[in-house]
Image (tube, rainbow, N blue to C red):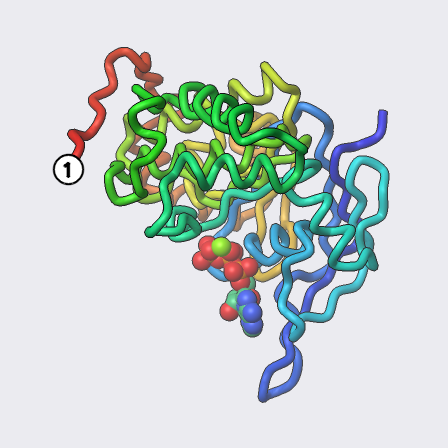
């Protein structure tokens, strides 16, 4: 079966005053269809750079070598137009600090609907109906009433879910989620992870989940790669990597990860009915 995503000897360097610095160094990995793959590693290890390379969103100062294949199709070398077509429909990303990607002056419903209409020929009414069902799917209650609310009327966890709704609106085959639960409390975190897991089950979405939280990885990911300074040190089924880490860095990361030791290997999943939604600030 063709892999959903395959990176073959991917390297990325940035031009700098003291010469180029290599921030992704000879990385190869494969993400199968319907798989949730975790990418972990300390700050600055190159995780977001890999995500941006896959999305074709690296700045002009970056030099890339190696191959990136999306569902069997080589994407390195595609022009901006082709990449824009792939983004949204084939692959989509929830950015680190995702909620800043919402326009503060525009209703969340219209923002999601716009994402839909950018890739599909839908009437306004159809886009609106689909948006409301997406808002419902990500657990925003009263979507019909909340459609016209701007982002600041939502809680941080709700805004994160709205960003996820926009990212999955066109049912991408690959979802890259860059620290989607950082800065959220454990209850909301569990709901977002449950949502991402549900996408895989309902739509067969492949997910590249970037996080520094090993508890999140152990709860959610089928396989994991541990990165350090641009390189993958260790990769394999999550259970094996964390159950029997072969690299000293992985062991150090496990020892240093407070969430891991506090939480053990399971995150409590709280049923959505119990969740306390933040009160509207009208
Ligand atoms: N546009 C850029 N220009 C120059 N250097 C960059 C650029 N983007 C990232 N870098 C450098 O590349 C390295 C990797 O950054 P990256 O954002 O990929 O790390 P990360 O693993 O996602 O870290 P974090 O966990 O903090 O989000 C860092 O040293 C960073 O300073
Ligand atoms: Mg990052």
Kindly state the secondary structure of the residue where label 1 is placed.
loop
Q: In this view, does 44 lie to the left or right of 11?
A: left
Of 255 and 62, nearer the camera is 62
- Quadrant where the C terminus sits is top left
Q: Residue 59 appears at what percent x and percent y?
A: 62, 68
The answer to whether residue 188 is seen in the rendering is: yes
Seen at 84% across and 30% down, the residue is 2
Q: Where is residue 43 in the image (x, y as percent from the top left)?
A: 45, 57
Residue labelled with disc 1: 281
Q: Residue at x 77, y 41 (%)?
A: 70
Quarter where residue 179 is shown:
top left
Q: Quick one: 151 or 42, which is closer to the camera?
A: 151
Residue occupying image coordinates x 43% and y 32%: 216
The image shows residue 166, relative to residue 135, as above or below, that is: below
Residue 214 x, y percent position in the rendering: 44, 37
Residue 182: % across, % down: 36, 43
Q: Is residue 188 left or right of residue 168?
A: left
Can you see residue 246? no
Q: In which quarter of the image is the N terminus?
A: top right
Q: Tally the marks.
A: 1
State the residue in front, 252 or 59. Answer: 59
Disc 1 C-beta below 8 A from ligand 1: no
214 in relation to 191, above or below: below
């Amino acid at each position: 079966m063709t892999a959903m995503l395959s990176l073959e000897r991917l390297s990325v360097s940035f031009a700098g005053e003291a010469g180029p610095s290599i921030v992704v160094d000879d990385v190869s990995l494969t993400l199968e269809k319907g798989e949730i793959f975790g990418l972990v590693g300390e700050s600055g290890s190159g995780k977001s750079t890999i995500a941006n390379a896959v999305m074709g969103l690296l700045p002009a100062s970056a030099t890339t070598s190696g191959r990136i294949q999306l569902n069997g199709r080589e994407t390195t070398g595609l022009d901006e137009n082709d990449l824009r077509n792939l983004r949204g429909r084939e692959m989509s990303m929830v950015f680190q600090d995702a909620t800043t990607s919402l326009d503060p002056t525009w209703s969340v419903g219209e923002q999601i609907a716009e994402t839909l209409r950018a890739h599909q020929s839908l009437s306004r009414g159809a886009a609106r109906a689909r948006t409301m069902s997406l808002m419902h799917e990500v657990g925003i209650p009263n979507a019909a009433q909340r459609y016209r609310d701007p982002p600041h009327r939502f809680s941080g966890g709700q805004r994160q879910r709205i960003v996820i709704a926009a990212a999955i609106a066109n049912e991408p085959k690959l979802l890259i989620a860059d620290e989607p639960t950082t800065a959220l409390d454990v209850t909301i975190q569990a709901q977002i992870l449950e949502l991402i897991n549900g996408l895989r089950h309902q739509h067969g979405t492949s997910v590249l989940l970037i996080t520094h939280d090993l508890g999140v990885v152990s709860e959610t990911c089928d396989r994991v790669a541990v990165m350090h300074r641009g390189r993958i040190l260790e990769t394999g089924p999550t259970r094996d990597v964390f159950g029997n880490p072969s690299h000293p860095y992985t062991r150090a990361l496990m020892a240093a990860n407070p969430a891991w030791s506090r939480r053990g290997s399971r995150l409590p999943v709280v049923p959505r009915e119990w969740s306390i939604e933040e009160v509207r600030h009208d």
